[in-house]
Image: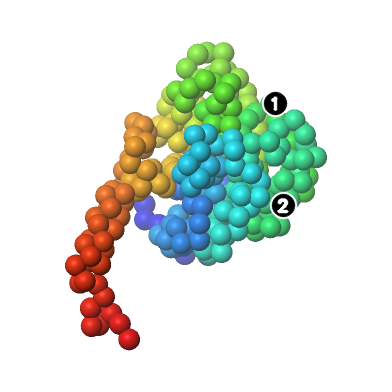
Amino acid sequence: MSVNKEIKRVTTHTLQEFKENGVKISMLTAYDYSMARIIDGAGIDVILVGDSASNVMAGHETTLPITLDQMIYHGASVVRGVSRALVVVDLPFGSYQGNSRLALESAIRIMKEAGAHAVKLEGGGEIRESIERILTAGIPVMGHLGLTPQSIYKFGTYNVRAKEEAEAQKLKEDAILLEKIGCFSLVLEKIPAKLAGEVAKSITIPVIGIGAGPGVDGQVLVSHDMLGINKEFRPRFVRRYAEMADQMHHAVAAYITDVKNRDFPNSTEMY
Ligand code: KIV
């Protein structure tokens, strides 16, 4: 299936139609204007301004430190570079859990100040009130179940989630709940492929997987991982489409050599 560039702007409705017609959804992260322009220009369906910015942009060990203001900064930069994709921005840790009023205020700031098209929140039944309140403002919400990195200190590891029956059962119930209360889509992270496929079949909204196998309605990866910018991170679920860190290293090394050897700039590279 080639990229459908006929679509002027991908909306939540487009994604729903994709699911109904069996068209797989492509999604990647971006955190800045230049990367967003490239990814959008290639025809991606959804750009996620993930709180993984905390890791790949800021160098933090977890996603917990990133603030709402920082997510708005990244979101606004991405939105300025995008003309086709649906832009979803993560609500960061501490901006929505346990307080639905705060959740609504955070989501409104993301929509107003970043110009996002939707927000994503991690969790199921335990954040139901927050999701419902955001939805009352007409803000589309994407859910996120399975490995939810904002709960890393509860999980203790980044290992595959929902391998045990009890956790798998809760995840299935949470997916049905998220659809029922009005989420337009759902991310499933790092869970067994069989379970992810069952969840995708059990609900009518699009399910987008990361490390969740092929039985879901679309795939998402962190762009720095699939482009090989982040070389050290090599989990099984990441396919590398480029070795950008190596290419950038070689380019920078060549530049240094040229400067040191007085080879740059030459007569055509000056005024
Ligand atoms: O923050 C992020 O990049 C994400 C993806 C891993 C789905 O939530």
The alpha-carbon separation of the residues under discs 1 and 2 comes to: 23 Å
Q: Judge from the rendering whether residue 159 lies leftward or rightward of residue 67; answer left or right.
A: left
**Which numbered disc covers residue 109?**
2
Above or below residue 41? Residue 92 is above
Q: Residue at x 37, y 36 (%)?
A: 233
Q: Residue at x 19, y 67 (%)?
A: 261
Above or below residue 234? Residue 240 is below
Q: Amino acid at mark 2?
A: Arg
Find numbered disc 2 in the image and state the secondary structure of the residue it sits on: helix
Q: Percent position (x, y) of residue 83?
A: 53, 64
- Going by the picture, which residue comes out furthest to the right? 101
Q: Amino acid at mark 1?
A: Glu
Q: Residue at x 61, y 49 (%)?
A: 71
Pick whichever, 146 or 10, lies toward us: 146
Give the crowd class for mark 2: few <14, some 14-19, many >=20 residues within 10 Å: some
- Going by the picture, which residue comes out furthest to the top? 165
Question: Do the residues under discs 1 and 2 have CB atoms within 8 angstroms?
Answer: no
| Viewer-side label of 1, 2 | 2
Residue bearing the label numbered 1: 126
In primary-sequence order, the first of circles 1 and 2 is 2
